[in-house]
Image (cartoon, rainbow, N blue to C red):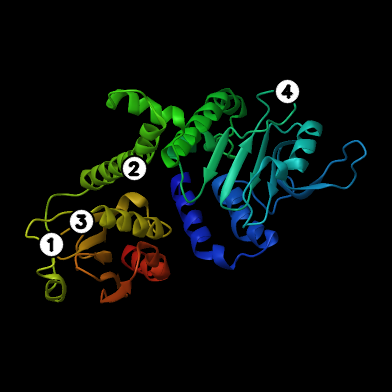
Amino acid sequence: MDIEEQIAALATKVRNHRAVILTEEAAKNAFVMPFIERILGYDVFNPLEVVPEFTADYGTKRGEKVDYAIKRGDDVQILIECKHPRDSLKVEHASQLYRYFSVTKARIAILTNGQVYHFYTDLDAPNLMDEKPFLVLDLEDVDDANLAELRKLSKEGFDLDSLIFAAGEMKLLGQIKRAMADQFKEPDDDWVRYFAVRLHDGPFTQKVREQYRPLVAKAAAQFVRDQVNDRLKSALYVNTPAQPVEETPEADAVSEGDRETEVETTLEELTGFQIVKAIACSEVKPQRVVGRDAKSYFAILLDDNNRRPIARLHFNGKSRKYLGTFDENKVETRHLIDSLDDIYLHADAIRNAARNIAS
């Protein structure tokens, strides 16, 4: 599998197992070691490539360890420090990385809790690890634009000079995007003023500020939602021929009348499709998983073939929603779900369906 598929598969594993991973050591075994091996491509059982509990004396500090050191030849190139899976990642958690960065030839340091990975280098001062990461990878919210740079840390595509050359821009872009996200969530006075003075006749008073602040936040949220909706629909329709799904009498009986005669794909259906696709791609290539909407249900198919169903989303009812999964005989079982998150409860059935029809 390529890096996109490997990350999607690991993200699904993190999502499914995170609730039972209660210790740092468990997170290392379940999440971090697979990241090193599957995403970066290094053999975690080869001490010439990956050194667990790496030790390097620093001044009066003796015997302190960093969780993993990745070597190329005789030199340490990447240091990895792991934290508890419930911890948020802060620069204070990186004390060992700071010290080891200056006493090894490593130019890359990674701080992780198994789900989120912060990547550091020494842009601000030579041989001194920066306080802010140049790249943040969250397996629950992967920015595809960062994957090309991540490949440069892999065993096969290692290109440290190119990565560090791009790291300065990546760091600034990341900071800008995070600042924009903060503004979208809770706009400050300057951003509220930016819109208010363009739309309001009169002085920018406290009353005007308080009037516009919730409106700016609401408009920002709606704008992001609309953009996501447009991208999801575009991605779906590019890969989906305009032809109906073969509908079963049972499906028609349940949802007939709950839908208008015209097919209307909702954001909820598109989001559900993306969840099922992320789960199924641990068994098949993502491009093989295709969605097709019809009057009675939203079908998720392998290779865009009606005879190869992976799942169905019965979201057209007025009050209840169902996820349909298929056994090895392609017999559908419907599961009542209260929210889209409940789809993950049936991940094994989705994977089994994808595996059965792909074989």
Whether the residues at callouts 4 and 2 have beta carbons within 8 Å, the answer is no
The answer to the question of whether label 4 and label 3 lie on touching residues, with beta carbons closer than 8 A, is: no
Please say whether residue 302 is visible from this viewpoint. Answer: no
Please provide percent x and percent y for residue 342.
39, 67
Secondary structure, mark 2, is helix
Snapshot quadrant of residue 27: bottom right
- The residue singled out by tag 1 in the image is 295
Q: Which label number is shown at residue 126?
A: 4
Point out the tag, 2 or 1, that comes first from the N-terminus: 2
* Residue type at numbered disc 1: Lys
Labels 2 and 1 touching (C-beta < 8 A):
no
Question: Residue 11, how many percent across, how many down?
Answer: 49, 54
The crowd level at tag 2 (other Cα within 10 Å; few <14, some 14-19, many 20+) is some
Could you give the CA–CA distance between mark 2 and mark 1, rounded to whole angstroms?
32 Å
Mark sitting on residue 292:
3
Foreground pick, 129 / 5:
129
Give the residue number, with chain letter if any, for mark 2.
Answer: 218
> In the image, which is nearer the foreground, mark 2 or mark 1?
2
First-in-chain label (4 vs 3):
4
Question: Which residue occupies 19% across, 54% down?
Answer: 265
